[in-house]
Every structure is written in C-alpha cells, then in structure tokens.
Image (cartoon, grey):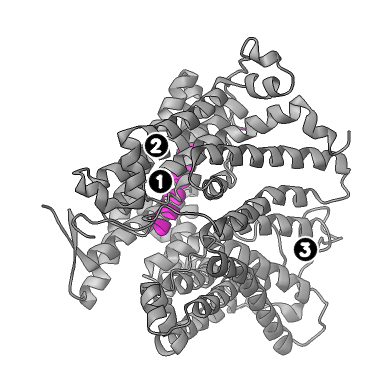
Amino acid sequence: MRLEPKPAPSLAVTLLFPLAAIATTLMLTSILVLAAGASPLSVFYLVAKGAAGSQFALLETLTRATPLIFTGLAIAVAFRAKLWNIGAEAQLYIGGVVTVVLGTGALPLPSAILIPVIIVAVMAAGALLLLGPAVLKTRFGVDEVVTTLLLNFIVLLFVSMLLEGVLKDPMGLGWPQSQKVIAEAQLPRLIQGKRLHCGFVIALASAVLVWVVMKKTVLGYEMRAVGLNPEGARFVGIPVNRALMKTALLSGGLAALAGFSEVSGLKGNLTLDLSPGYGYTGIVVAMLAMLNPLGVIASAIFVAGIFVGADAMSRAAKVPSYIADVMVATSLLTMVVAILLTRFWIRWR
Amino acid sequence: MDALEILFTASFWVAAIRIASPLIFATMGELICERAGVLNLGIEGIMTAGAFAGWFTVYSGGDLWAGLLVAALVGAMFGLLHATLTVPLGLSQHVVGIGVTLLATSLTYFIYRLALPEVTSPPKIEPFQPLPLPGLSSIPVVGEALFTQTPLTYLAFVSVAAVAWILYRTPIGLAVRAAGENPSAVEAQGISVTGIRMGAVAVGSALMAVGGAFLTTSAFNSFFFQMINGRGWICIALVVFGSWRPGKALIGAILFAAFDAYQVRLQQISGGIVPYQAFLMMPYALSILALILVARRATYPKALMIPYQKGER
C-alpha cells in the first residue's frame, strides 16, 4: 500500500469529505444505538431536534458552543505550528481563576474598563501557562504533549485548593465554590432572560481575528511554515523558537478566554465543574474545522449540538448520553482519515 | 511516626509495589510501541477500557484470568485501530492517540451505562488475593514488600523480564528496535516495517489494558469513572525517564510509586497544615521534573513519530 499525493483538492471535495466523515460517524454509532435497543433514525432525529428543533434548543447549542469556539481556536492555532497543546483544560481553569480574582470586587471599576482589564489579565495568565511547556520543548526537548497533559491535573488540583482556601465563598454553605463576580464584571445576556451571552459574540470576533492573523500576518506565515517543515523554516531564516513562543502565547490566551466567558457570561462563579472537558473537546472541534479558524465556529456549533441534542435524546429514549462523547471521538478519527483522503490516493500494489 | 521512619516500614513498600504494578504493565506496553517507532497516546483510554473489560468479565461470571485475557484482547483491538491509522496511513500519532483515548474512554462509559443503567454505587467483584511466596515472603521488609503481593504483581515483574529478553535477545526484538531506529534497514532485510510496527502497537496496547485491569481485579474490586486518572500519561513520562529501557523504566515506576505512597503518608502526618491538594499534585509535578532532568540526554528512537513508506529512504 502506498500514499500518492493528489493535486490540490477542489472546493467541492474539501467540503464533501467532512460530510462523508460525519456520515461515517453516524453509521458507526448506529451500531451502539441498536445495541441499546433503539432505532438509529429516531435517535438521530431526537438528537437533531434537541439541538436545533426550537428557539430554546438552538440558543442552548450556541451557549454550549461558546467555550468550544475558544478552545477550538486555541488548538487550531497551536496545531498549525505543530505545537501539541493538550492543556487547554488547564488554561481554561486559569482563565476562570483570574476572572474571579479580579471580578469579585477587588477592582471597583465600571464595566467598560473592568471587563477589558479582566480579558487582558486572563489572556496573559493562559499565555504564561502554555509558555512553560513551550520553553521546555524548545530549550530542553521535553515533549509538550506530556507536560501540558500533566499540567491539566496540577491546575485542577490547584483550583480545588483555591476553592477550598482563599477563593472559597464564605456564604457558599461549605461548597468549594468562589463568590459570584460583581455585576460590572458580568458579560450581558444577548437576549433578555435567555442563557446566551455576549461571550458568544466575543468568540465569533476572536475567530475572525485569528483568521486574519493566520492568513494575513507575518506571524501567521511563520506559524504555518514552522508547522509544515521546521527544518526548512529554520533554513529560510524564520526564528522557529520565537514563532513557537508566540504561538504558545496566542493559544494559551485563547483557551483561557473560554474560562473567562463561562464564569463571566454564564455561571457567575468558579466551581470545579466549570468545564466538562472543553479543553479536550476543543481538539475535535479544531480537527473537524481542518484547523481553519472560521471553520471552528461551524464545528463548535456542530459538536455543541451533538452534546445538547444527546442530553435531550437521552431523557426521551433509553440511550445513555455518553453516545455524544462516542460520536465526537469517532468523528475526530473519521475526520483525520477524510483529510488524508483529500490529499492522497491510496494505491494498493 | 516521623517522615523518615515511614521509609523503613514494610507496609509502605508493600503499598509502593502495589501502586507500581499497573504502571509497570502500561509502561512496558508504551515502551514496546515507542521502540517500534509509534508514540501511543491512546494509553489513557486503553487502560480505561482494560479496567472495565477485566472487571465486567468477572462481574458477568467469568474467571479472574479470563478477565485479564478479555482486557488484553480489548486493548489489542484499540491498539490495532491506532496502528492502522498511524502506520500504513501515516496519520499524526498525536491526534490519533488523543482520538483513541477519547473513543476508548467514552465507549467504556457508554457500555458501562448500558450494562448497568440504574446503578449508583458500582458493584463489587472478588479480586485477586495476595499470594505470599513461601520462604521469600518472610525476608524482612524486602521480602514482605516483593513477595506478599497478588499474582498480577508477580506477572508485572515477569513482563519486564520478558520484554527485555524479547527486545534484546530475539530476532523479533531486533526487528522491533530497528523499526524504531532505522526502518529502511528492516525493509532491506525483507521484513515488513508496517507489520512489525502494527504488531508492536497491538501487543503494547494489550499490556496497557492489563495494567488498567490490574486496578479493577487486583487493587480495587470495582470499576468507577475517572479511575485511571492520568496514570497513562505518567507512564509516557516513565518511558522517557527510563530512556526506553525496560529495566530503567521499572526502577522509574517503583521510585514514582514509592513517592506516591509516601505523599499519602506524609499527608496523614502533616495534620492538615498543608492542603491535601498540594500532596496530590506532587506525583504529576515529579513526572514533569523527571522529564526535564532526563530529556537533555534522552536518546529517542530515531524514527519515533516518523511515518514510514515502503521504498522511501
């Protein structure tokens, strides 16, 4: 068996293969649905209805997509430069910590100043958290996959320590949770009385900004060059290590925004269940989008829809809601195969 | 009891060896994969699947050894999935590995919920019992620590010897090491690099799954969510720490486990002055520290993470 490069794929092919990947995922997960004694068509219909079948469902999907856009962008940026940031979960939690440290009354400022200050601080904290593994990678040759993964556990324990210590809400009836952020530090809701908040708009704007950075700036060019061929990039005079550092800063900052947006826009305070694995799901979001920042918006909404829809479906049909995680994981694997097939012929000899 | 006395008690070393056992299996599994040139980040999920498969077989009426066999087979299947995508297709070993971890973990949870829909506290099984080896177990401290364990712990040590022997003393081992160092030389001998790598990943993944099954059939007596809890990632650090050598990796696993057992005891005597989370962080922090100390002089298998296509140089 050999892989032979194809000519540049047409737009139709580029769009068709992700759809084929999703169709394959549905077929594979049908087996599990059948094993659960339900009919795949009715289950997938219930998932789709639960994700987008009503105004409530749709708003819930967009709300759930918001942190996934941030973590998906973080991963897309990093993976483009082949910086394997698997630590978006930790960066998200650090973002949440900074939000409650600054947002619970320490800075008595009006909203228009306080929120930008928090955003800058959050991004700086997330950026610094990924800078460590990036420095270890470039200076000492320590694989960043393991360091970022291990940092997820360390940071979660650190957050747990804070929530049972200095950040613990004295009025929290003993629960490990922080105080609520003050009204000035809250992102307004997009629609009165609904859960969808301005974090979603910030996420969309971030995606566009990141797209511009990746497509139109020197940094974006350097990141892509480093990702494609680090030796070649070094040969043509690109400061590879410095490009990796900048990538790390951008990626960590974006992931931390997910924590800010969840605390400030949705939950109001920091708890240990702020993220049900948004950092890891961001990997799937980024891959489904083929690492394209604008594609991240669509794939985040798609993945969020699966989770929201599966919750609704699980209540109606007797199929465990873990089917959503299986679908998301399967679509990651089918998608990488689909991307391969857009670029190569497989020749059997 | 003061902090130093702990180190000289037999019960501490018994616990350390017990904690080391699943790490030894999984580290040997990862080591085989990496020696053949494939980084297997599916390890965390494969261990989860193995832990469940072993437990569920016994829970459904199977023998404990049958549970291990089923766990190994499940692990090998996920290994083959990983290998198919990364070896002949040459896809990113990082992305596929994370994908396999997510898939194996979520499939396990799905099947657990399907099999036991209404269960709130996980049902228990009768796990492996300690099997003191006559004579040896009466040697003070060392004998107690090493020879009053369950059969699976003895098997973990046997697996290190077996992996070392196969890697350095057999033609297959030579081919595996060469596939990770210089695949075109393997191909020149008329041996398929693809076959060697896929086989190594399948066997390595089976060992990882047995490491997971140790937790449910030997250390605890039931399966619960999040039970692997980063052990897989630590095994990847242990492989680097052991410079891809079975013996050194074994020492690393025991040192690491001793540290883990030690922090639990330190926590008890610290009387709550230091937050318990600080102790729980130490094993992960120690792994990162070990990586930093070793990475500079680490000699990676030269073809690690580099896909190989037949006929290419």
Q: Amino acid at mark 2?
A: Leu
Mark 2 lies on a secondary structure that is helix
> In the drawing, does residue A102 fall left or right of residue A141?
right
- The image position of residue B62, as x and y in percent, is 45, 19
Who is closer to the viewer here, B110 or B294?
B294
The Cα–Cα distance between marks 2 and 3, rounded to whole angstroms, is 53 Å
User: Is residue A202 visible in this depiction of the protein?
Assistant: yes
- The image position of residue B20, as x and y in percent, is 61, 35
The N terminus of chain B, quarter of image: top right
Which residue corresponds to mark 1?
B35
Q: Residue at x 66, y 80 (%)?
A: A119
Q: Chain of mark 2?
A: B
- Tell me if residue A295 comes above or below residue B150 in the rendering: below
Dot 2 or dot 1, earlier in sequence: 1
Q: Quadrant of residue B118?
A: top right
| Dominant secondary structure of the residues highlighted in magenta in the image | helix
- The image position of residue A124, as x and y in percent, is 65, 78
Which residue corresponds to mark 3?
A178
**Badge 1: how crowded within 10 Å, few (<14), some, or many (20+)?**
many
Q: Quadrant of residue B139?
A: top right
Task: Answer whether residue A147 is magenta in the image.
Answer: no
Q: Amino acid at mark 1?
A: Arg
> In the drawing, does residue A180 fall left or right of residue A278?
right
The Cα–Cα distance between marks 2 and 1, rounded to whole angstroms, is 9 Å
Q: Residue at x 17, y 74 (%)?
A: A7
- Tell me if residue B267 comes above or below residue B121 in the rendering: below
Which residue corresponds to mark 2?
B167
Q: Amino acid at mark 3?
A: Ser
The C terminus of chain B, quarter of image: bottom left
For the residues bearing labels 2 and 1, Cβ distance under 8 angstroms: yes
Magenta stretch bounds: B93-121
